[in-house]
Image: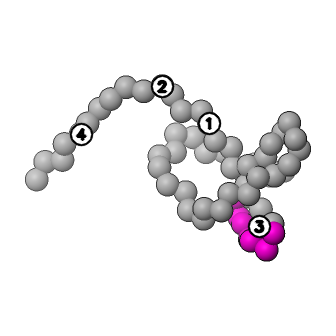
């Protein structure tokens, strides 16, 4: 069996910065969050799994 590879063109994706910290908001727990630097607030991400392709990953402690 030969798998067909489809290629295409698109604009580069914007990077997504995810942070890890177990937290709770309005009774809902979350593990991942984004940070809005302009409003200095965390935005919980309710999804628990990462999917897709990683082109770069950096782990830092804050």
For the residues labelled 4 and 3, the Cα–Cα distance comes to 39 Å
User: Looking at the picture, does residue 27 appear above or below residue 48?
Assistant: below
> At which x and y percent is residue 28?
74, 71
Task: Using the image, tell me which numbered label, if any, was put on residue 11.
Answer: 2
Mark 3 residue crowding within 10 angstroms, few (<14) / some (14–19) / many (20+): few
Span of residues in magenta: 26-32
Of marks 1 and 2, the one in the foreground: 2
Most foreground residue, 37 or 26: 26
Q: Is residue 59 left or right of residue 23?
A: left
Q: Name the residue under label 4.
A: 5
Q: Name the residue under label 3.
A: 22
Of marks 2 and 4, the one in the foreground: 2
- Of the image marks 1 and 3, the number of the one nearer the N terminus: 1
User: Secondary structure under badge 3?
Assistant: strand
Which colour style is shown? Answer: one colour
For the residues labelled 1 and 3, the Cα–Cα distance comes to 22 Å
């Amino acid at each position: 069996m030969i798998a067909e590879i489809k290629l295409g063109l698109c604009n580069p994706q914007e990077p997504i910065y995810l942070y890890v910290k177990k937290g709770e908001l309005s009774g809902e727990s979350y593990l991942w969050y984004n940070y809005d630097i302009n409003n200095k607030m965390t935005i919980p991400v309710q999804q628990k799994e990462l999917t897709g392709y990683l082109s770069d990953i950096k782990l830092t402690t804050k």
